[in-house]
Image (cartoon, grey):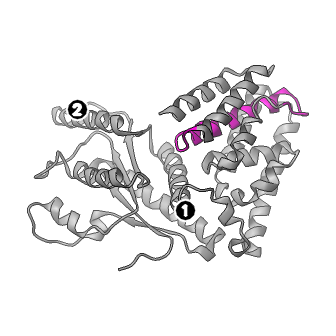
Amino acid sequence: MERKMNEFKVFVASPSDVSDERVIISKVIADINFILSAIVQERKIVLDLIQWDTHTVPGLGIDAQKVINEQIPKYDIFIGVMWKRFGTPTTTSGSGTEEEFLIAYNTCKTNSKFPVLFYFSQKHISYPTSEEIKQLRKVLKFKEELSRKGLVWDYMGPDEFVEILRRHLVMTVSKLINNAKDIIRNVSAPENALTKNDLELVQQRVFELREEFTTIHNSKDTQSVERAKLSALESKMRSMALDVVSMLQQLVTSDSIFDRLLAISAMKEIPQSQYFEWLANRVGSSSRYGPRDTSFISLNASIALLIASHTFKGDLILAPINIALENFNNSTYKDPNILLALSEAKRKAFE
């Protein structure tokens, strides 16, 4: 059956010990679908979750994994997750998860734009048995092999996995929709504009965040307390990235420190190449509100460039990073975390 326009199938491969993560993946996809249906409903963009236990029926073959492979439909995004268990061997691979990964990897070798996302849980293992140690060794060996092929991602627990996965899926879908071009051109087009009700909801949410920012800014908290509150606020801003991305042209030309932070937060979730130089020039850019704002904006702009360096390569990202480094060197506000982020961004851009 022909795929519906802008319907992207997401296949999940994992051993049995990460059942919580499979539930999280389902919930994150449901959340993203809800947001997409609200802000770009005309395009009918939807993610369809594919899992062997929901998309297969009993059958006979060489082994159970072969039966599963034959029934799984063609998919657009591969997500793999492992913790301490590698899985049961198949006739051709060390486990069903490994065999499913190899199928996806073969697709990736012929189509470099095919997304393969693999995550490894770093959750603590209490008193592992000899069998668990044996399985864990296989996981570590597999992770080492994957790391030589590309980028894998670690996470400490469910809360961190939710945030990481949401960001990565949004970025992945953005690239699939636009063939690595910026999403802003599409979501800001008149035919894809928000409905009046949707726009009112977004404006109300932005107003609430602006009020919270003003309260923090006018408080007499210590710098560490203020920074903690701003970080929590910035996290809320990032959750609105899909809404805010269509407002970027307005936000980046604003003199408001809140508007600039809102724009940077959105670009940490959905990098926009036409604004990379704008991000670079936020590093060390003085603020009329004082050094605290300058430092916080600079740090988040640097992190936005670091995140973008995982996806964008060459002069497209290297040139802005070099501009940011030059601005940092010329600035009187030399937060070592800014230099660390920019240095790591430059290293990633060369990989």
- Tell me which residue sits at (78%, 68%) in the image: 200
Which residue is outermost to the bottom?
A: 1
The chief SS type of the magenta part is: helix
* In the image, residue 95 lies in the stretch drawn in magenta: no
Q: Quadrant of residue 110?
A: bottom left
Q: Is residue 262 left or right of residue 41?
A: right
Residue under circle 2? 137
- Tell me if mark 1 has few (under 14), some (14-19) or many (20+) residues whose alpha carbon lies within 10 angstroms of its own: some
Which portion, as a residue range, is magenta?
Answer: 286-314
- Relative to 64, does residue 115 appear above or below in the rendering? above
* In the image, residue 291 lies in the stretch drawn in magenta: yes
- Relative to 147, does residue 261 appear above or below in the rendering? below
Disc 2 residue type (three-letter) = Arg
Residue under circle 1? 32
Q: Is residue 313 left or right of residue 252?
A: left
Q: Nearer the viewer, residue 102 or 321?
A: 321
Residue 108 image position (x, y, % from top left)? 35, 52
Q: Is tag 2's residue or tag 1's residue first in the polypeptide sequence?
A: 1
Residue 287 image position (x, y, % from top left)? 87, 33
- Tell me which residue sits at (67%, 29%) in the image: 322
Residue 39 image position (x, y, % from top left)? 66, 68
Q: Nearer the viewer, residue 45 or 309?
A: 309
Q: CA distance from mark 2 to mark 1?
A: 35 Å
